[in-house]
Image (cartoon, rainbow, N blue to C red):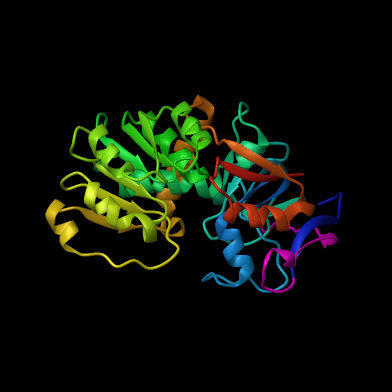
Amino acid sequence: MAGKQLMRAVRVAQFGGPEVLKVETNVPVPVPTQSQVLVEVKAAGINPVDTYIRSGTYAIKPPLPFTPGSDVAGIVKDVGANVTKFKPGERVYVSRKVYVSGGYAEFSTADETDIGHLAENATFQQGAGIGIPCFTAFKALCFLGREKVKPGNSVLIHGASGAVGLACVQIAVSRGLKVYGTAGTQEGIDLVLKQGATAVFNHREEGYADKIVEATGGVGPDLIVEMLANVNLETDLKIINRRGLIVVVGNRGSIEINPRLAMQKESLVTGMILMNATPEEWAEMHAEISEGLKAGWLAPHICKEYKLEEAPVAHDEVINNQGTLGKRVFVL
């Protein structure tokens, strides 16, 4: 590739807190392999999993030093010899199958199968918000929750104002479900309602679970997408409709549950990890998500933009906040 040989990138030389994130200006621009695409990054998504990898507590530990970040959006600069779906100059987004590194930089490489065309009506910031949030939401609802995702059925989305939660709301609305959500602030509640939710409840208020049951006609939701199982799973089992399904997307600790709660409702609980998706599922998700962006029923909400130099602040705020309102991204 003719052109720039060195780039700016956030580098991690040792695992630790946000302070280990350092911007370097002389990082070599990566060279794509035969099956890869080189993307000039315009925006990079910031995900909670990035902080786990940075701290060294995640199951995957990239060799040091590394550049964090899996989700980006930008313009194709170069392609490998075997790449057939993309060409230089095209707008694309990247959603990697494995949470590897390389996103917080001016250039990033990705396998052809990890890339989708970015609709002209979507910004690069929105493109950077597609990866983990939208693919996680799609897998939770349309694969694991497929039997319950039917027009007229009800779904409760815990943490609906976060990036994954908002994607769940938008996908569920597009499928004709009655969508209920929870959020921790009035601003979050208003945001979720604007996405088409039927009703949204403040999970900080005592008795909110009873209000959810009341709103569903006394039977509870048919499907629950759970973002914080260690806090909410017991409540989910109490309010789920008979033979309902709970899909656990997020968890940050342990919880003790009485199995009788599941027995009484004959409910099912399943967990999910995005990287477990099959190649066929990845291809279907790319096709459906790209179409959703083009049609406009899927539109990531960006709550805050950062410069690469603000990486430590971004990593702190993506974990420690009073109420998430969509996606945080770096803009280059």
Measured from the top left, where is residue 302 in percent x and y? 61, 37
The image quadrant of residue 89 is: top right
Rendered position, 234 above or below 58: above
Is residue 104 visible in the rendered structure shown here? no
Residue closest to the eye, 35 or 108? 108
In the image, is residue 30 part of the stretch drawn in magenta? Answer: yes
Rendered position, 170 above or below 236: above
Is residue 126 visible in the rendered structure shown here? yes
Residue closest to the eye, 238 or 195? 238
Q: Which residue is rendered at x = 16% and y = 48% of the image?
A: 243
Classify the position of the C terminus by image quarter.
Answer: top right
Measured from the top left, where is residue 51 in percent x and y? 61, 62
Q: How many marks?
A: 0
Q: Which residue is rendered at x = 57% and y = 65% of the image?
A: 52
Residue farthest toward the front in the current orientation of the protein: 206
Image position of 99 (left or right of 26): left
Q: Which residue is rendered at x = 64% and y = 61% of the image?
A: 101
Image position of 138 (left or right of 233): right
The image quadrant of residue 328 is: top right
Q: Which residue is rendered at x = 78% and y = 57% of the image?
A: 9
Rendered position, 41 above or below 96: above
Measured from the top left, where is residue 253 in percent x and y? 42, 66
Measured from the top left, where is residue 320 in percent x and y? 59, 55
In the image, is residue 229 part of the stretch drawn in magenta? Answer: no
Give the residues drawn in magenta, as a range.
Answer: 13-33
Residue closest to the eye, 181 or 305? 181
